[in-house]
Image: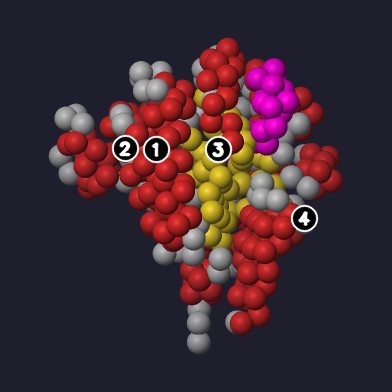
Amino acid sequence: MATIEDFISAIPKAELHVHVEGTLEPELKFALAERNNLELPYTTAEEMRTAYDFDDLPSFLSQYYEGMSVLLSEEDFYELAMAYFSRVAGQNVVYVEMFFDPQAHTSRGIELGTVINGIHRARVDAQERYGIRVQLIMCFLRDMSAESAAETLEQAKPYRDWLIGVGLDSDEKGNPPVKFREVFSDARAQGYRLTMHCDVDQEDSVTHIWQCLNEIGVDRIDHGVNALEDEKLREEIKQRDLGLTVCPISNSYVTDGTKSEAIKAMLKEGMCVTVNSDDPAYFPGYMTENLIRVQHEAELGVDDVTQLVRNAFEASWLNDTDRAEYLDQIESFVAAG
């Protein structure tokens, strides 16, 4: 008899919240450092993993940005993305909306085209090789200026057809959503879909989520667990049918736990909550591991897990026809039992 872990592993899944830079596993980091003649402050992959000792968002970001130093060429970005796609293909992830952080690279002197071309090539090969459909979301770094974000949006115009949306990530403290109101308004006018990180248990979390809704007009919220603290906010999110991309294992590293019970509460509330991996090389666990962790901690049944998986496709930026096809795949999988 199949276990619920087997069910989670095999069901077709979508990932809506994964940073390509956060999929840089230590082994690949060493390989890229060697190719690029760079010296790392570690001697082994295990030593590097041991150094990933985060207890809040800033301590994670420090290691996260340090790790990007090995990404220099188009081939580096291609191999980074392909390593992720090859791994999640084995977890039956069939659709991905992938974040990348251009400013983290252009600020190091890397051309934007180098970054996007490498990731886009991997996107095309992932479809051909693994049957994984991929759409790309360009994130702005909120601890940089709004002017820098606007410059990045302008630089991305030649690649507009390869990008589905824009997001906002990095250190939230002192960097509220309204700081980027104009650039997100411009992005909306250019046809981008909009999302923003509202990280867990941050200062003014609830206020920032309200800003995302009322000042920015987002199509989705990344993280957003603190919405549970405000009944009116919960109801507004439900009324607008906004998806929330929650990342359990990463939560356990930067706050007081995975927030699995919060995910269960959101399901009970009828909110479109989804489970994702965030930065799985740093917070060990890809899609399957995150879903299993939530299932165990919140004691979810098969119907609950199926709803989480279904929510990810519902909250995706697929067109209606393609979304319906993926949802039919889920129904067929569950029916085959």
Q: Which of marks 2 and 1 is in front?
A: 1
Tell me the number on the disc at residue 118.
1
Residue range (magenta): 181-200
Name the spot of residue 176 as percent of width and height, x first.
64, 22
Mark 4 vs mark 3: which is more N-terminal? 3
Pointer 4: what residue? 269
Q: Which amino acid does label 3 sit on?
A: Trp
Q: Nearer the viewer, mark 4 or mark 1?
A: 1
User: Which picture quadrant has residue 325?
Assistant: bottom right
Q: Which of marks 2 and 3 is in front?
A: 3
In contact (CB < 8 Å): disc 2 and disc 1: yes
Pointer 2: what residue? 76
- State the separation of the CA atoms marked 1 and 3: 12 Å
Q: Which of marks 2 and 4 is in front?
A: 2
Q: Is residue 324 shown in magenta?
A: no
Pointer 3: what residue? 162
